[in-house]
Image (cartoon, grey):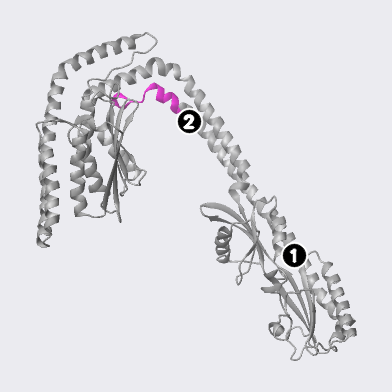
Amino acid sequence: MPGGRVNIFTKIMIVIVLMLVPIVMMYNSSNKISTDVVERELLQVNLNRLRFFVDQMDTEVDRLWRAAFVIAREPDVVQLQFRSSLSPTYASLEAKKLLMEKLDMQSTTFAWSNKLTVFSPPSGVAVSTNLGQQYDEAYFADAVQDNWDYRHIRTERGEEMAFVRHLILPFTPLSKPTNPNLYVEVTFSSDNLVDMLERFMAGSGGMPFLYHPDFEPIRTRDSDSKLIQEMTGQFAGMKRLQEGSVKITFHDEPYLINYAESAAVGWYLVDFVPLKQVLEPIDQSKRIFYGASLLLLLLGLASAALLYRNVQRPIYLLIRAVKSLRRGEYGHRIEELEPKNEFRYLIQQFNLMSDEIRTLIDKVYMEELRAKESSLKHLQAQINPHFLYNNFAYIQSMAQLDRTKAIVAFTQHLSQYYRYATRTEQQLTKLADEMELIRNYLEIHRMQSERLRFDEFWEEGLMELLMPRLLLQPLVENAIVHGMEGKKGEFLIVITGSRTENGYALTVDDNGCGLPKEKLEALRASLQQPSASQSLGLWNVHQRLRHYFGPSSGLHLEHSVLGGLRAALIIVTEGGDSHV
């Protein structure tokens, strides 16, 4: 936009957007009101369901407790106190059998599975529908009469969690008799409550469970135990009444919590309902509305398309082309547009002018390329002495330790490395010679750090490939300098060479620290810049590849399957074998 003025197309789009803004604002207000109403109604409906569940549970629990009083008044139970278990007679055995049948009959009258037991301390006789437990005075030492106790019991199926309560005769509501005549035990398994929770959960979309601060929560069989534990922690930290509803945010998701306390057992029934799931129809309606708004916006764009195609786009292309020339991109061309009008003539004249400028600067550009090649040789001369100084320090330390063999092996690799690296008169070499340099270079580093390991894999015949010298070495050096630092344990470098459909790919993988996505994208972008702002070695490799093999070739960077960074030399040739 020359002079900072807003163009015609932008003005039209602003008008269209301003027309849609009031509609969107009105819809958002209406949507919020609807959401609030749904939340309030959902809280009330769920709370009523919880009340009904708790009433059902308390009714069944009270019926079981009243059965204890009925059993205690049975004549056979009263007579049980006068029968001894030490010398059973036929009459006493017959009486116990009859009492067992009555207990079984009483037990089956309830919807819940339960166990009924009668024990007389004076006679030591016990009769029970639970055949898995041995009853004696020691068992009833921790008898609980005033409330239901949640504990482990032993049944025919093994140990399980159950609610237990005892009627102790003579009956005293607030204290335990010193010498009781009779115990009546009533137990019911927590599986009964699990079954009720699963029926309650069906079709509700919530996650109900029973909570008591002193015990593990009672939950459905297929519920997420970890999620229930976390929800239990949330509920435990809340200030609670006998019943209530509240809205919370849990794991960045909104939830509606309903809870009600059972007067019979003292546990809370808690139901967490994901609000997002409940409000899905409203959200769906919102998405439809926004889709319709987007469609209106697209129609507005279509209405401005004719103006954009005939006026705005040609002006934009001309402005962008002029800016490209100012940045030095003299090869920029504008694609000729339809229809044929005054702007097409201007574009043709601009392209002719750009061609003439390009012709004039070609010679200057080639001189600049030769200057870059000379700069590369200068960089080699700067980098190698720094590498040499580090190696001298290693040789000195080995000499102080009198490790002659290590010094001999190290200097052999070092001499072979420099014999190759200092031959600046020959710019092309075979891949086999380049790899010999890499092996010497890696062996030098491996002798200084035993945790370095490297492998190489090549397709047959690839070692005859001709390429510019010192293309692979900067990639390996970059892997060691940046990937090995901060990496604990073994550091692995894998060099691979393979043919592609239109050339070759030489890759260097490492299992080092790698780069975050943002830094990797920034590094890729720096390779395309006219001059190096960072990673000078990698930038030089990329530019030399493009200069020698063409613009389709270059250095590609990506995350490695080993966990670190992958640097790949992509060489594109006409037939794939032009330099072999």
Q: Secondary structure at mark 1?
A: helix
Rounded to the nearest whole Å, what is the CA distance between mark 1 and mark 2?
59 Å
506 to the left or right of 156:
left
Query: In x, y percent, where is residue 367?
Result: 12, 24
Q: Residue at x 44, y 24 (%)?
A: 12
Q: Residue at x 58, y 60 (%)?
A: 225
Q: Amino acid under label 2?
A: Leu
98 to the left or right of 565:
right
295 to the left or right of 468:
right
Q: Is residue 255 above or below residue 549?
A: below
Q: Is residue 299 magenta?
A: no
Q: Residue at x 20, y 50 (%)?
A: 445
82 to the left or right of 406:
right
Q: How many marks?
A: 2
Report which quarter residue 324 is drawn in.
top left
Q: Which residue is mark 1?
A: 57
Question: What is the span of residues highlighted in magenta in the rendered image?
Answer: 1-14
Q: Nearer the viewer, residue 480 or 68?
A: 480
The image quadrant where one finds the C terminus is top left
Q: Is residue 163 above or below residue 557?
A: below
